[in-house]
Image (tube, coloured by chain):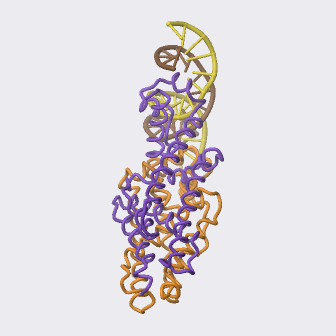
Chain colours: A purple, B orange, C brown, D yellow
Amino acid sequence: MSTSDRLIEATRELLWERGYVGTSPKAIQQHAGAGQGSMYHHFAGKPDLALAAIRRTAQELRGTAGRVLDAPGSAYERISGYLLRERDVLRGCPVGRLTMDPEVVASDELRAPVDETIAWLRGRLAEIVQEGVDRGEFDARLVPEDIAASIVATVQGGYVLARASGSTEAFDAAARGLLALLSPRTAAS
Amino acid sequence: MSTSDRLIEATRELLWERGYVGTSPKAIQQHAGAGQGSMYHHFAGKPDLALAAIRRTAQELRGTAGRVLDAPGSAYERISGYLLRERDVLRGCPVGRLTMDPEVVASDELRAPVDETIAWLRGRLAEIVQEGVDRGEFDARLVPEDIAASIVATVQGGYVLARASGSTEAFDAAARGLLALLSPRTAAS
DNA sequence: GTCTATAATCGGATAGAC
DNA sequence: GTCTATCCGATTATAGAC
């Protein structure tokens, strides 16, 4: 792995753990095993490095979520697969987390990959919900875009509940609750 | 308002806006119009002041949410009132936000009011869902604790979606989506 | 490409005068 | 109770040698 790569990876870790305001160039250099001169040779500064790290994290999330959502199965099964997929719940979402960072939100450049990733996820889930409606799995009165937003919000909020309590239990409860509401069996009661 | 109060209020604002790691004693003093000596006379330091601020914010949230949840009406109406109540969506939740702060989560003392507030909210919502089940408003197979977690997660995650896109639209979509799934009319399809 | 030196400002306080 | 002085390390770089 090149020095540049190690710097990006270290930044990804620290952004996930401590956010943008909580991450210093010095900490990045120590994690990457690189000196100051090295870091400023490869990147213009903290924002530049953060942008590279955020883009890579966003790309990775898209890949991981995409694979789950493209899996075979009914709409309900794929949504269930997304909600219940293995996660490092107590670490939170490496992308969603950035929305709580004042400097990320204040910068159009830093926020863009976050916005695009979440917009893509909502869009992909809306397509799947639409398929479910078309196949008669879900009530036709449901608005796919709204349900998609609820699904993504449940996951993002699930992280908040879990971190508040220090336990993954709340995340799982929120996911189960949403799935019960979405379940063809329950809804057809 | 006393100097002590002004310090707490300034800290509340800054914690909401920038989080714990992003808030410096100097910034607090400037916002409060107080000198350093003044701040360190009233509080032992940044963690002490933050604790007072977080407790006050938690208390206020409990009051506001409690009033909405204690309102008259069916279970669905009260949940709907909670989800759709007026909020400063793009600022996010002043309590939930703290769960993304590494130093808050690392401190049992600072995390406690956050944990208690969210646990209380989940409990109160679970009671309301249970009432809805008892009255036949909701499917009896629903697990009230799980649905309550989904409701709180939808709100907390709604803030994330809204801040990612820079628009309140996503929050509203997530709330509508969950309400549609919860709606006696839709569920009875 | 990487290293060390230097620097201005901030962070988070303590000490003591008033 | 509030103010000013002082302190030491961290932050976020830039400059120039190697």
| Quadrant including the C terminus of chain A | bottom left
| Quadrant including the N terminus of chain A | top left
* Residue lying at 56% horizontally and 53% vertically, measured from the top left: A117
Q: Can residue A68 be seen in this view?
A: yes
Q: Residue A186, percent across and down?
A: 40, 82
* Residue lying at 60% horizontally and 70% vertically, measured from the top left: B172
Q: Residue B84, percent across and down?
A: 58, 75
Q: Nearer the viewer, residue B15 or B180?
A: B180
Q: Is residue B68 visible?
A: no
Vertical position of residue D2 compared to residue C3: above or below: below
Q: Residue B62, percent across and down?
A: 48, 72
Vertical position of residue B92 compared to residue A111: above or below: below
Q: Say how many tags the image has.
A: 0
Q: Nearer the viewer, residue A158 or C12?
A: A158
Q: Residue B181, percent across and down?
A: 50, 78
Vertical position of residue B108 compared to residue A35: above or below: below
